[in-house]
Image (tube, grey):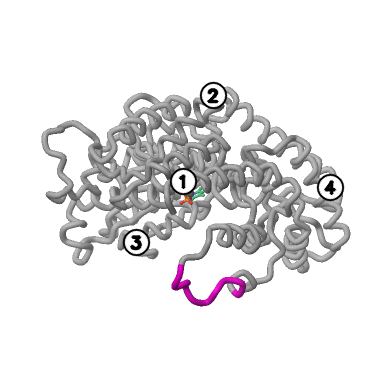
């Protein structure tokens, strides 16, 4: 592709992107599924000779787009949002064009310094105290892995990276059963082993870790010669928004000298609104906090911020510093590759900077307040229908419900087929989960461009299809 073609196709791509966004309301949220059809439509062998861009682009429009699930669709109520506000997409076009490798300060000073600044903007926006530093990771999973590695190294007096775990006492990590599966994987990858992830029972409306049980488990492990290392707490768990009591958990961590990592990947965005901060009272006592601006806030994937109270122990765990990466003569500068597992890093701060400036915190707060209020209104409406039950109350904008069946034994199968029927219908998109072993349907409102009517309209789709399916 020569310079002229690059210019023309870039414009064409931008025009396509804008038209695509404008067309979303007319598309089914999830494509009608027929596994293998797209795979079969792609040539089995790579081309030997160049093909014209017109043909490539036509195939993209014909074969690929109809098979996409539209995550920016205003009636996407499944999983959690992965909002990419248009302004953050524009920033990503620019980042793509520059295609810089931002691993060290000197490999892109602006990327590093803008990252330091925007992460501190977010610290202030969330009401976290001064003293928390931070880094933009690719995902919450990476941040959690880094936190688990730091717990491990601190507990092993920094011997794990060098000597391995053989011959060491078993490192123990504590979490409830409401935490995301990225915690399990971090434990596996860190070599700690699933058997050493101690599940603490939960209680109360928000399904929080029972901190007495937590304390008892830590004491029992110590007495047995095991090595308690850290606690992973969650604010807004993925299944139903399960939320730990951070203040009480932090107190246990302090008493036992354990590292506390808080996973607020989804709910963290809501903490730009002071009235929701009661969900993480005590957060200033955490050692590490992860939240994803790439979920609710609108910074295009990937953009996950990890805040750290003591970056020194985090960097001591992760930094390698081979000779060819040393940036001599610039003491005191930050090399963010030492703060993460991957070496290479994209320029992720630009989209956050564009987003925060173009919308302003006040508009972003309003968006989140709307989503919470609309979701609560929908839950209240469903609760008034005799054939529906609310299974978990709204935690911010997430709740779960069930369509009642005459016999409880039929409930799981019925609600699963209901979710499938709703998603095949295409007007809205939902996902299911399990609550105390039984299927429940999740609903979350969080789309950047959703309106009150989009959320309220879900009521009609859900009740209509449920009564037809029953
Ligand atoms: C989405 C989510 C994750 C995983 O986030 P990635 O950035 O995709 O790794 C972890 N924890 C919670 C609570 C989440 O909602």
Query: What residue did someone put label 1 on?
Result: 4
Query: What residue did someone put label 4 on?
Result: 460
Tell me the distance, in whole angstroms, between the alpha carbons under discs 4 and 3.
45 Å
**Residue 207 screen position, x and y as percent:** 57, 47
Dividing the picture into quadrants, the one containing residue 37 is bottom right
Query: What residue did someone put label 2 on?
Result: 360
Going from N to C along the chain, the mark reached first, 4 or 1, is: 1
Is residue 434 among the parts visible in the rendering? no
**Left or right of residue 411, residue 236 in this image:** left
Neighbour tally class for label 3: few under 14, some 14-19, many 20 plus, Cα within 10 Å: some
Q: Residue drawn at (32%, 39%), measured in percent from left and top?
A: 255
Judge by depth and name the residue closer to the eye, 266 or 38: 38
Q: Secondary structure at mark 2?
A: helix
**Residue 61 screen position, x and y as percent:** 63, 57
Going from N to C along the chain, the mark reached first, 4 or 3, is: 3
Quadrant of the drawing holding the N terminus? bottom left
């Amino acid at each position: 592709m020569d310079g002229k073609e690059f210019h023309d196709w870039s414009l064409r791509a931008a025009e396509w992107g804008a038209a695509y966004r404008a067309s979303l309301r007319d598309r089914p949220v999830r494509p009608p599924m027929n596994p293998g059809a797209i795979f079969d439509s792609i040539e089995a062998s790579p081309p030997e000779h160049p093909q014209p861009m017109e043909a490539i682009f036509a195939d993209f429009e014909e074969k690929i787009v109809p098979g996409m699930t539209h995550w920016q669709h205003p009636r996407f109520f499944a999983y959690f949002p992965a909002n990419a506000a248009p302004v953050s997409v524009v920033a990503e076009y620019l980042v793509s064009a520059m295609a810089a490798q931002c691993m060290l300060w000197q490999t892109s000073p602006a990327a590093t310094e803008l990252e330091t600044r925007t992460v501190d903007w977010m610290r202030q926006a969330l009401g976290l105290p001064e003293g928390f530093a931070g880094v933009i990771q690719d995902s919450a999973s990476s941040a959690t892995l880094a936190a688990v590695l730091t717990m491990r190294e601190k507990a092993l007096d920094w011997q794990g990276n060098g000597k391995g775990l053989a011959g060491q006492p078993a490192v123990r990590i504590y979490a409830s059963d409401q935490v995301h599966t990225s915690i399990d994987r971090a434990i596996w990858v860190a070599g700690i082993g699933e058997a050493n992830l101690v599940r603490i029972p939960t209680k109360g409306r928000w399904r929080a870790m029972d901190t007495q049980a937590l304390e008892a488990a830590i004491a029992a492990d110590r007495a047995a010669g095991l090595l308690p290392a850290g606690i992973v707490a969650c604010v807004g768990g993925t299944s139903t928004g399960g939320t730990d009591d951070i203040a009480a958990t932090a107190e246990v961590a302090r008493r036992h000298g354990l590292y506390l990592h808080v996973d607020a990947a989804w709910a963290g965005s809501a903490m730009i609104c002071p009235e929701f901060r009661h969900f993480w009272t005590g957060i200033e006592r955490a050692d590490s906090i992860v939240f994803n601006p790439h979920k609710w806030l609108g910074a295009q994937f990937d953009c996950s911020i990890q805040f750290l109270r003591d970056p020194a122990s985090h960097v001591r765990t992760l930094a390698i510093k081979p000779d060819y990466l040393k940036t001599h003569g610039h003491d005191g500068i930050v090399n963010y590759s030492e703060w993460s597992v991957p070496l290479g890093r994209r320029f992720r701060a630009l989209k956050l900077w564009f987003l925060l400036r173009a919308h302003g915190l006040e508009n972003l707060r309003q968006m989140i307040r709307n989503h919470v209020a609309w979701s609560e209104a929908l839950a209240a409406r469903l609760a008034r229908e005799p054939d529906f039950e609310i299974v978990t109350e709204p935690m911010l904008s997430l709740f779960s419900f069930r369509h009642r069946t005459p016999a409880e034994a039929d409930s799981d199968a019925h609600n699963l087929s209901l979710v499938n029927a709703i998603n095949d219908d295409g007007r809205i998109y939902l996902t299911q989960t399990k609550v105390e072993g039984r299927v429940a349907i999740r609903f979350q409102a969080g789309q950047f461009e959703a309106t009150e009517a989009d959320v309220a309209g879900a009521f009609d789709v859900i009740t209509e299809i449920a009564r037809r399916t029953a």
